[in-house]
Image: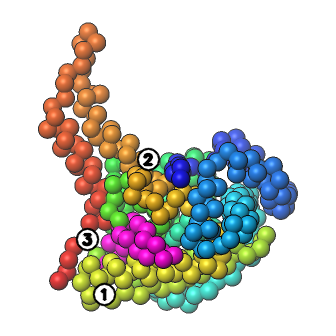
Amino acid sequence: MENRQWDGATYGTGWMHRTLIRSLRFLDVRLFYWFSYIFVIPVALIKNPSRRSSYAFYREALGFGRFKSALQTYLNHCMFAQVVIDRFAMYAGKRFEIEIDGDEVFQSLISQPEGFIQLSSHVGNYEIAGYSLSSGSKTINAVVYGHEKQSVMDNRNSMFTKTGTRMIPIKEDMSHLFEIDRALVGGDIVSFPSDRYMGDARTIECEFFSRKAKFPMGPFSVATMRGLNVLAINVMKEGAKKYHIYITELPYDKSASRKQQLTGLSSAYVAELERILRKYPSQWYNFYDFWNIAGTAGAGESKMAQESLKRAGESEESGSPKSNGDSKRMDESKKSGNVQRVRENLKRMGKPKENG
């Protein structure tokens, strides 16, 4: 199966995004839904190999028949179009009905001085949570992909400012790690996407729909290293103008060894993700062969990590002065050291330690 990676950015140009936002100020979202069903999704299914991984998810992971898997593949892409349109509708000032399960758990943790972790996934429309949950005196620090379109980032910033949420973009120099640390030391909240991992980052293997799958170790490592409370938050679409937020505390034995904590927490996260997907099967938006990760660099954000490693190895070579078209040969030990430093930085958050 072809495994094509998502490049991390919302489709379209800044001009297209601004035009969509202006249109959504006056038109109902359902008009845009139907336009996408009829004109956009069929073309996308023909041209984009994402249909194969989507079909495989329903056929192999969920055990649906051929016809039901094909229908769910179409509905899956329709739902994805809906949540993208809904994000721009929020930017345009529209609001959705929100139902929350587990808000008492969220408010209880908000009232405590310690920070805590929120884990999200590429299901539903998690961005809605950032506009809907009131975090009181705590700031929600959302770790996000750093190469998103500027028009999208500007609109997110505008929306998040109103709810005490700030973004921490993943950066190639790893400076986002220090921002995460400062937020947790200050007793704030850090939100991680936890179902996709970066190219060379450490992973943890979990049983997911009766198959072994790899998940990023970083979010689980940060939580267990500090003994923090962890919530899984999933925001699922239930109607044209309604979302349902599920807030679930993820249990793990904080007195156990570090390895056992990592296993317990990651297993709890994956079990909750599977529960949500069985209830909302059409809202799974990992459009790649999720269980065939060993042969790929990872999903989504891996492209950035690979480019970072490449630049580390080439930085001195490209920076060397050239004379008469001849460049100096870079010292191999320095090149190796550069690459190693970047690799260590990429793995830092995910490297487990044993606590006995």
- Residue drawn at (27%, 49%), measured in percent from left and top? 342
Secondary structure state at the residue bearing disc 1: loop
Q: Which residue corresponds to mark 1?
A: 254
Q: Which residues are magenta?
A: 204-224
Rendered location of residue 323, percent (x, y): 24, 13
Residue 182 visible in this rendered orientation of the protein = no
Secondary structure state at the residue bearing disc 2: helix
Q: CA distance from mark 2 to mark 3?
A: 24 Å
Q: Residue furthest top?
A: 324
**Contact (Cβ within 8 Å) of mark 3 with mark 1:** no
Front: mark 1 or 2:
2
Amino acid type of disc 2? Answer: Lys
192 or 49: which is nearer to us?
Answer: 49
- Residue drawn at (19%, 24%), measured in percent from left and top? 329
Tell me if residue 105 comes above or below residue 163 in the rendering. Answer: below
- Local packing at callout 2 (Cα closer than 10 Å; few below 14, some 14-19, many 20+) is some
Tell me if residue 298 comes above or below residue 273 in the rendering. Answer: above
Relative to 323, 148 lies left or right: right
- What colour scheme has been applied to the protein in the rendered image? rainbow
318 or 21: which is nearer to us?
Answer: 318
Q: CA distance from mark 3 to mark 1?
A: 15 Å
Front: mark 3 or 1:
3
- Residue drawn at (19%, 29%), measured in percent from left and top? 330
Q: Quadrant of the C terminus?
A: bottom left
Rendered location of residue 340, percent (x, y): 22, 48
